[in-house]
Image: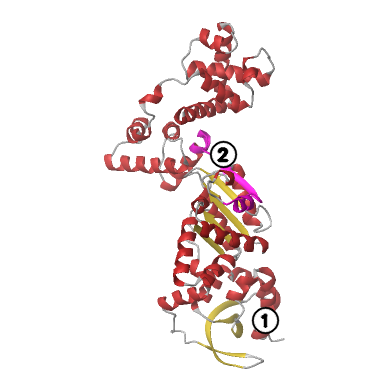
Amino acid sequence: MKLDASNLWQEVLEDLSENISKPNYDTWLKDTIGISFQGSTLIIGTRSEFVNEWLERRLKPLILKLVAKRADEPLDIEFKTVSIQKEDKNEKVFALQPQYEKTTEHNLKEEKQQQGWSANQPSLRKNYIFNNFIVGPSNRLAFAASQSASNSPGKEFNPLFLYGGAGLGKTHLLHAIGHSCIEQGLNVVYLSAEQFTNRLIASIQKRNQRNFRNIYRKTDVLLIDDIQFIAGKEQTQEEFFHTFNELYEAGKQIVISSDKSPNKIKQLEERLQSRFEWGMIADLQVPNIETRMAILKEKIKIHQVKIESAVLYKIADICTNNVRELEGSLTRLLAASRLTGEDINVALVEDTLRHLQTSESLYSPPSVDLIVEVVCDYYKLQNTDLLSNNREKQYAYPRQMAMYLLREVANISLVEIGRSLGNRDHSTVHHGWRKMDKGQIIDEEIKRDVSNLKELIDRKRKIA
């Protein structure tokens, strides 16, 4: 039986309505028609070149699959712009626009504005995807939650609230969620809280708040970066409160990032704080040295350079604050090598990254109390546990680690260490110190713990 282009496309549209969101269907597919066949190609009429581009880029694989299923044979598809010639109660009559009649850049821009949300197509960084995100103990939960939210938008972890210091990967995860959701054909809006405020002000000035609300309340996925910037802004918080409610009640995904947890954002309305806490809250912390090494190894692949592990370790040892500092330091180092002609070695790292080196005042050794506090926090012990005579491994191992760190980091004598850790004999301290010192060579757990604890001690010294 000969296929009818119009009927075939109507059947495909029914399938598409079940596979994509209603806002996307109404925006991009509602007024499309099956025009004709040209060989094995189904010609589909749309109302603009902008719609053609969107369908080609976002939905073509799904449409090809559904067309083949309905036609019982593989067919190609082609989108062509049409214009309405007349309309009655029963049908719309379309005419193909001439092939050479392309929409101008100005008209495309105007078309986007008429589409409401599409004027705000998110400017997502191409390399900010899940595959490029280095996962470690400091960000594993945030990464897993972000993937789950993008796999089941609006159903799991909604809202998702990501928080942590600058340069730790919050924006990377927001963009990765955005890329993943766009690939699913979802309408995604990404912007910072500051942009949200500025656009709200502009809409008030131009008296078009309805358009503003349509953009942010009719989206499938709303990604808001640095939400802490709405604190203290009464009207912005009021607008965002209603935007949040409408999206949440419609089952749309909301992902928010901040530099601190909701209950720590000063001048944030209680009703917003409580809503941010409805879903999943995940923090991103400073990556440990192993994660920093993994990040550097990934970056040198991108730069297509070879750098010895010892040099990478030196960079990772110096750059302890955040990923952005780490990446910037590597770029600075590569530039210094290229400009001076020097090989990339430890000496060049120390010279190039001198500005990041610890100040002289911090070279004084950490106190006994500081090291004991860090060890107790790391192993989740009380101070009394570390000073006790309990020889069970859960107490003896952290105690020996403290002995090692007090000797190596604080440069304290064995006698003084023994006195500080419950009046122990110096030979006991010597045994504990040597056990940890040699253990690093053969035991990965000891090596990892020493590295992590040294880093935590250094970070606490800087805070203090």
Q: Secondary structure at mark 1?
A: helix
N-terminal-most mark, 1 or 2: 1
Residue ID at (56%, 28%)? 448
Direction left: furthest residue: 340
Magenta residue check for 277: yes
Image coordinates for residue 360, horizontal then vertical, percent: 36, 25
- Whether 165 is drawn above or below 376: the answer is below
Magenta residue check for 314: no
Q: Are marks 1 and 2 in contact (CB under 8 Å)?
A: no
Direction right: furthest residue: 1
Segment tinted magenta in the rendering? 269-292
Q: Residues within 10 Å of mark 1 (few under 14, many from 20)?
A: some
| Quadrant (top left, top right, bottom left, bottom right) of the N terminus | bottom right
Q: CA distance from mark 1 to mark 2?
A: 50 Å
Q: How many marks?
A: 2
Q: Secondary structure at mark 2?
A: loop
Image coordinates for residue 151, horizontal then vertical, percent: 64, 56
Query: Where is residue 434, by image quadrant?
Result: top right
- Whether 420 is drawn above or below 295: the answer is above
Residue ID at (70%, 71%)? 18
Per the image, the residue denoted by label 1 is 10
What amino acid is found at the position of numbered circle 2 in the picture?
Ser
Per the image, the residue denoted by label 2 is 138
Image coordinates for residue 288, horizontal then vertical, percent: 52, 35
What amino acid is found at the position of numbered circle 1 in the picture?
Gln
Nearer the viewer's eye, disc 1 or disc 2?
2
Could one spot residue 175 in this view of the protein? no
